[in-house]
Amino acid sequence: MELEAARRAVLAAVRGTCAADLPRLLHWMRNTNDFDELVVSNNDVVLKNIAEDLRNRLPIEAMFNSEHQAVQKIHQHPLPMIHVDAFLYDDDFVDSLCEEGKMSRSYCTECGSYKTASLEFISHSFSLMELKFLYQHVLPDLTGKGYLYSSASQLYGVEMNADFCQLQEMMVTKYQFIDRIKVVHADICTEASLLQKADVVVMNNVFEYFLDRQEQARYETLADKLLLIQQYQFKTAWEFIAFNVRKRGSLLVTVPSLKESLSKLQTNIQLNQWVEEMQLNYDVYMEKDVDREALEQIHLYRIL
């Protein structure tokens, strides 16, 4: 049944309800969880099981000590910050951890006082909501999109950290995804051939977190020189991506937008000669508790 026909059928059922029961029916429709099972697929259940497996194998901050650069960046942040993996911990899960005293959404700005401020949460993963939006509403009807939502012939994940590669390969094997998913332990800037052949490239906040946000680089100290090196590496990484993601008609998904990512860098990338942004309908995702701000960070481009 199509949407309009279904809407008419629901309205007809509501109008046919006796007047005495109508208020209770409407209250039930507004507050019931009975419809949840209609929008939860077996794929969602599998992803939630994977998230549970990963939570059991990772510390609560979902980071390994071997992620030296990311750990250092968190410690250098001027305000308290914690990494909360959006795939592993949705808002309800975070709330339960806060109630158990295992996590907090705020910190005390003056120890012993009631003066608190909100902690900044960062995540380098898509949440389940963002994944479903991406594969069900952002990407067009391709041969394949993601393992659980399509029949893509091959999916590659490029990961620099050896510990996370091992963990990902463990999940791929356990859930029998090995026929179509391959985890590549490498720096993306060594994978030109992979980028050149790809039909869809998804980049979720892959460089931004390591970019120094100061508008001007200073040279007086060794630390400042290292920050400049990081910024140079960030710039050259984007230029490598732009040089190799050139397959006409292929798609590039980024979080955040390319414009935002490149705004603080002086590169030779001419966006209007490389990509065309495709407009997305952020209102199409109808499930409750939608984080629209997170969805609006997802951008889709077609390679010219």
Image (spheres, rainbow, N blue to C red):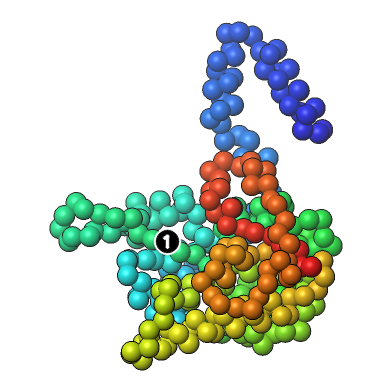
Q: Is 298 above or below relative to 261? A: above
Residue 274 place in picture, x, y as percent? 73, 70
**Between 289 and 29, the one nearer to me in the picture:** 289
Q: Residue furthest right?
A: 143
Q: Quadrant of the C terminus?
A: bottom right
Residue 134 place in picture, x, y as percent? 67, 56
Q: Quadrant of residue 122?
A: bottom left
- Please give the count of numbered marks on the rendered protein: 1
Q: Quadrant of residue 33?
A: top right
Q: Is 118 above or below relative to 254? A: above
Q: Quadrant of the N terminus?
A: top right
Residue 184 place in picture, x, y as percent? 67, 82
Residue 70 place in picture, x, y as percent? 45, 77
Visible residue check, residue 159:
no
Q: What residue do we see at 52% from left, 84% from top? A: 232
Neighbourhood count class around disc 1 (C-alpha, 10 Å): few under 14, some 14–19, many 20 upward: few
**Between 143 and 103, the one nearer to me in the picture:** 143
Q: Which residue is mark 1?
A: 121
